[in-house]
């Protein structure tokens, strides 16, 4: 005999108590829990739950009887759905007690004015991660029971709607395993959500709340994740600015990454972010709700396994998880900024520490490439891009530590692989969004060359990359190595110089060594290109700027090198009495201020020769600076 659970209502002492007994394989039974229901039932004694109704009952009478169902699923959820007796009016009320979350929600749905006569009662259907509340001809409410906190994660449809029309209008009884019994015909159905209709609704609905709900519904219930993700990406590319209540790219990346991991491991849904949206204040048309805290069920046994173990974990989480344990990648922001600052100054705390971080990033990239079925169209993952690799590596370390602290009973190797899969999925989704646009606009690898003008197709991809950057920056998520180089190349193609520099100064475009090196080599020395090169190199960190300047054989480059050399020499300079015996510089022109300045530089160089030696520029000295100053002055005067 398989284990069976029987739920019943105890109505003694003017209280409504939900109880559950479990029949075990040895034909004994155990009282598992008691939970208090804040509903009014006037009958006394016991009442069994979920036994449905007699199909011969008059439907007019059936609609006026209360409906009460208990639903559970494999994630350890426990929901009690309740609808009181309905008499008449233009609205109907029903409640859902989320015992695994510690609160209840009471919904009031408007029935409309034209055809509000209700001949059938509310039907509650268990669809695993969702509970469907269905009133034939009026509304269909798909409630997210795993993440019920925000109403935007549940789908509410009303009126003349294809999904409502497809459902039978006879009394239905929900059974285990998403099975549904039609009481009139005696037929048994398996209830599944229609993916093609949900995708169609995603394309056509004008409401942000429905877009949000359908997006999560498709990702959570989808049977072919790669196909569904491709369809969603196509929709995002066509509607990038359609949503005003949330960021489409953010929500898709977070939700899809979440659902790629959570079905595999129990309890991890408490530790990974489910949505980019924290609060939702916009009303849902046609429905209102009231949320109330409820007492948690009182467990009557101390040894749990299977469903009861998961339910108990959910209850413990509600009791003690303050604040929320969902991972937030912004915790690594300070450490990442410190590592970038150290790189700019050329000082590292520990090479072993940095090497370990970069090794973590390499594991993610190898894991990602192993999952790729086809060669990538976009020129990503073709350069070192240490900044993004450091961010990826730090995320691996922090997320692994987070899961190890809170995920009990899971092997360390499994957690490490889970972390690699999760971060690989994040990066892969960004690549897929970019590749879909790349393929749509038929771009080619030669787009990486600077010596060409931008097209409308390149501008469309540049705009999408800017939106991706905006979405990931606010969540502090990593980008595929090479993203910033490609973004910079497209920016040079598509933007006027003043706009380009504005984007760079405000951090929208990041100057990578690969991009600037390619720019210096690809562009000739026309007046426009000289101005572009000089403006770009002048904005580089000193160490990278010195390295790039050496590649540009031009007076402008000498000017940049001279500026950096003088800045380095004078940063700690204090005026002191000069020794008349000091050898004068061999540089001398009939311009006393310049002569005096070069003499000062020569004195500093002679006293700090080892300290101020320029890496890769052994020939940079005071004489070089003087000659560069004269050449630059000559150019400015047009002589």
Image: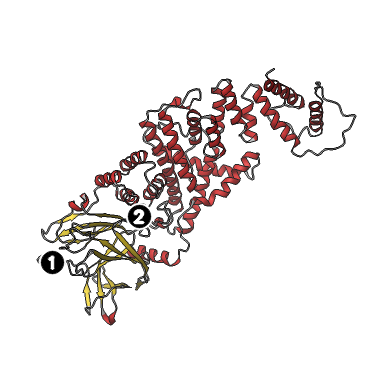
Judging from the image, what secondary structure is the residue with disc 2 in? helix
Q: Quadrant of the N terminus?
A: bottom left
- In the displayed structure, would residue 64 be above or below residue 434? below
Q: Nearer the viewer, residue 86 or 479?
A: 86
For mark 1, give the secondary structure. Answer: helix
Label 1: few (<14), some (14–19) or many (≥20) C-alpha neighbours in 10 Å: few
Q: Which residue is mark 1?
A: 60
Please report the residue visible at 90 percent of the width from the left and 30 percent of the height from the top: 580
Instruction: Give the farthest residue toward the left.
Output: 56
Give how far across and how far down residue 493 sits, in percent: 48, 28
- The count of marks equals 2
Q: In the rendered image of this protein, does residue 377 appear above or below residue 398?
A: above
Q: Are marks 1 and 2 in contact (CB under 8 Å)?
A: no
**Residue topped by disc 2:** 152
Q: Is residue 80 visible?
A: no
Q: Where on the picture, by quarter, is residue 146?
A: bottom left
Which image quadrant for residue 358? top right
| Mark toward the start of the polypeptide (1 vs 2) | 1
Residue 400: where, in percent of width, then height?
Answer: 48, 51
**Residue in view at x 36 percent, y 62 percent:** 310
Q: Please state if 463 lies on the left or on the right of 77 as rendered.
A: right
Q: Quadrant of the C terminus?
A: top right
Query: In the rendered view, does 437 fall on the left or right side of 525?
Result: left
Of all residues shown, which one is farthest toward the bottom?
13
């Amino acid at each position: 005999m398989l284990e069976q659970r029987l739920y019943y209502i105890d109505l003694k002492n003017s209280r409504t108590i939900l109880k559950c007994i479990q029949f075990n394989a040895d034909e004994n039974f155990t009282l598992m829990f008691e939970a208090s229901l804040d509903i009014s039932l006037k009958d006394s004694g016991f009442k069994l739950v979920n036994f449905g109704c007699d199909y011969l009952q008059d439907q007019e009478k059936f609609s006026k009887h209360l409906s009460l169902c208990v639903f559970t699923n494999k994630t350890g959820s426990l929901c009690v759905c309740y609808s009181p007796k309905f008499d008449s009016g233009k609205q109907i009320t029903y409640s859902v007690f989320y015992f695994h979350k510690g609160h209840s929600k009471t919904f009031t749905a408007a029935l409309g004015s034209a055809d509000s006569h209700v001949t059938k009662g509310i039907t509650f259907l268990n669809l695993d991660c969702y509970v469907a509340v269905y009133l034939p001809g009026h509304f269909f409410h798909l409630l997210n029971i795993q993440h019920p906190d925000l109403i935007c994660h549940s789908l509410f449809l009303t009126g003349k709607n294809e999904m409502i029309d497809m459902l039978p209008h006879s009394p239905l009884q929900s059974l285990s395993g998403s099975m549904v019994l039609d009481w009139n015909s005696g037929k048994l159905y398996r209830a599944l959500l229609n993916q093609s209709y949900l995708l169609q609704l995603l394309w056509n609905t004008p409401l942000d709340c429905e877009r949000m709900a359908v997006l999560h519904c498709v990702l959570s219930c989808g049977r072919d994740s790669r196909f569904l993700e491709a369809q969603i990406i196509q929709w995002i590319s066509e509607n990038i600015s359609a949503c005003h209540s949330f960021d489409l790219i953010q929500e898709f990346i977070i939700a899809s990454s979440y659902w790629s991991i959570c079905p595999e491991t129990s309890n991890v849904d408490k530790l990974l972010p489910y949505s980019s949206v924290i609060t939702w204040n916009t009303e849902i048309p046609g429905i209102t709700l009231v949320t109330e805290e409820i007492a948690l069920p009182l467990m009557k046994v101390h040894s749990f396994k299977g469903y009861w173990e998961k339910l108990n974990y959910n209850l413990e989480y509600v009791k003690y998880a303050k604040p929320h344990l969902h991972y937030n990648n912004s915790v690594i922001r300070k450490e990442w900024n410190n590592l970038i600052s150290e790189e700019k100054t050329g000082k590292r705390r520990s090479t072993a520490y940095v090497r370990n971080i970069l090794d973590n990033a390499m594991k993610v990239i190898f894991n990602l490439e192993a999952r790729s079925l086809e060669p990538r169209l976009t020129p990503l993952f073709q350069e070192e891009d240490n900044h993004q690799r450091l961010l990826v590596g730090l995320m691996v370390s922090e997320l692994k530590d987070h899961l190890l602290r809170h995920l009990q009973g899971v092997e360390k190797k499994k957690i490490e692989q889970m972390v690699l899969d999760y971060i690989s999925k994040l990066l892969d989704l960004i690549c897929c969004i970019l590749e879909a646009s790349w393929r749509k606009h038929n771009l080619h690898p030669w787009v990486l060359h600077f010596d060409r003008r931008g097209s409308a197709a390149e501008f469309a991809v540049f705009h999408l990359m800017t939106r991706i950057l905006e979405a990931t920056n606010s969540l502090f998520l990593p980008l595929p190595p090479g993203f910033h180089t490609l973004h910079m190349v497209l920016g040079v193609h598509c933007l006027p110089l003043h706009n380009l520099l504005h984007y760079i100064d405000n951090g929208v475009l990041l100057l990578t060594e690969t991009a600037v090196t390619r720019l210096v080599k690809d562009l000739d020395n026309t007046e426009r290109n000289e101005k572009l090169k000089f403006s770009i190199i002048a904005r580089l960190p000193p160490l990278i700027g010195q390295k790039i300047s050496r590649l540009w054989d031009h007076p402008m480059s000498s000017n940049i090198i001279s500026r950096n050399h003088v800045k380095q020499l004078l940063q700690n300079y204090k005026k002191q009495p000069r020794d008349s015996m000091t050898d004068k510089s061999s540089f001398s022109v009939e311009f006393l201020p310049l002569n005096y300045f070069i003499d000062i530089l020569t004195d500093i160089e002679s006293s700090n020769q080892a300290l101020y030696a320029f890496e890769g520029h052994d020939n940079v000295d005071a004489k070089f600076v003087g000659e560069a100053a004269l050449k630059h002055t000559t150019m400015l005067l047009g002589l």
